[in-house]
Amino acid sequence: MITQKTNHMEYQENMEIVDSAIMDQVLSARESFDPEAYTEEDVKRALQKDVLHPEDFAALLSVAASSHLEEMARRAQEETRKHFGNSVAMFTPLYIANYCENYCIYCGFNCHNKIHRAKLNAEEIEREMQAIAATGLEEILLLTGESPKMSDVSYIGEACKIAKKYFKVIGLEVYPMDSKDYAYLHSCGADFVTVFQETYNPDKYKDLHLGGRKRIFPYRLNTQERALKGGIRGVGFAALLGLDDFRRDAFATGMHAYLVQRKYPQGEIAFSCPRLRPIINNEEINPRDVHEPQLLQVICAYRLFMPYAGITISSREGSRFRDQIITIAATKISAGVDVGIGGHSEKEAKGDEQFEIEDGRTVEEIREMIVRQGMQPVMSDYIYV
Ligand code: SF4
């Protein structure tokens, strides 16, 4: 059993080890990044470049760049238009289970939190998906808490098979697993895998993740590589901004994605940009120093560093911010979100929610907003032949 006493930097039995130098490279880049060490000139130089190097990315995440947000947003908008036109993809997350064996002290689903746990069976999953598909969405993101016991790989695989009947694109936000499991889920229809590293500071990580498989830092960090080795088409990266120094964590997230992209050029890369949200039974957890201007800075820096990467903006953020960021840098937006278990087809969700959302607009309302912003809502840009 993995507890507070388990060395978080050591792989455990039954965890696939990939031969990779990426973790060390990311950690050493994070370590040497000093957000205070950049000047206005460094920022201006970075903003003039067509192709950014890691040093330029660092400059854009620095404290000095905070006073160049307008220019960053303008440049980010140019890059987004160049690579994505004016399209904005829509999707919705579907929580199919909320059992979790990990003890992350900042999360409402953690194994010590007394919440209503539930798991949808195949009929219930199908009902939820029918209700979602009826809104016109063609992309779904399936989520579970992290319990390989209660939501095993075959359970997730069955959910993918059902999803394949209703959706063109299937993303997963579930517990990290081995490449053979990803290969199986890919064969069931899964296209994308996103795993949040939460923080790339190993010491902080140890203090925040007190038990469960998630405590093992390298196994989590190398998830995207295992997913790509398993044949998954694209992978998502994120730090939960606000857990530790957000500038350093954003820098590490970008470096992680950049290095994975260089090693696996076939993989599609995406970023999520979550900030801490209040959770059930923990009044103390709230977003701290990452306010909207800081979030905007991070998102624009991701866009300028990796112009082809997808950027998802979640319903954790308020409508005003979401409406603006899709015109600047974000390329994917969630809509019609219910973070409880089974809330799409039933009035009463079976299980509690992981966190509170800010933007509860329906699919139609988000679609209308995208059009109002002069953008084009896209349900899916994949054609299967
Ligand atoms: S963050 Fe994820 S792994 Fe951690 S307690 Fe919450 S659901 Fe479980």
Image (cartoon, helix red, strand yellow):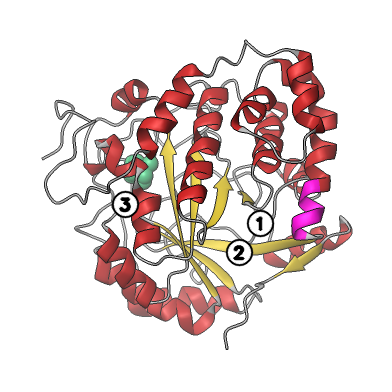
Residue 255 place in picture, x, y as percent: 52, 36
Q: Nearer the viewer, residue 286 or 272?
A: 272
User: Magenta segment range?
Assistant: 79-84
- Prevalent SS, magenta region: helix
Q: Quadrant of the N terminus?
A: top left
Which structural element holds mark 3? loop
Are circles 1 and 2 on residues that touch, CB within 8 Å? yes
Residue 93 on the magenta segment = no
Q: Nearer the viewer, residue 117 or 257?
A: 257
Residue 166 place in picture, x, y as percent: 52, 81
Q: Could you tell which of marks 2 and 3 lies nearer the N-terminus?
A: 2
Q: Quadrant holding ligand 1? A: top left
- What kind of residue is marked 3? Pro
Residue 332 is labelled as 1
Q: Is residue 272 visible?
A: yes
**Relative to residue 285, is residue 147 drawn left or right?**
left
The answer to whether 323 is drawn above or below residue 69 in the figure is: below
Which structural element holds mark 1? strand
Residue 91 is labelled as 2
State the separation of the CA atoms marked 1 and 2.
Answer: 8 Å
Which residue is located at x 14 percent, y 25 percent? 5
Which structural element holds mark 2? strand
- Tell me if mark 1 has few (under 14), some (14-19) or many (20+) residues whose alpha carbon lies within 10 angstroms of its own: many
Residue bearing the label numbered 3: 176
- What kind of residue is marked 2? Phe
State the separation of the CA atoms marked 2 and 3.
Answer: 22 Å
Q: Nearer the viewer, residue 374 or 12?
A: 12
Q: Is residue 199 visible?
A: no
- What kind of residue is marked 1? Lys
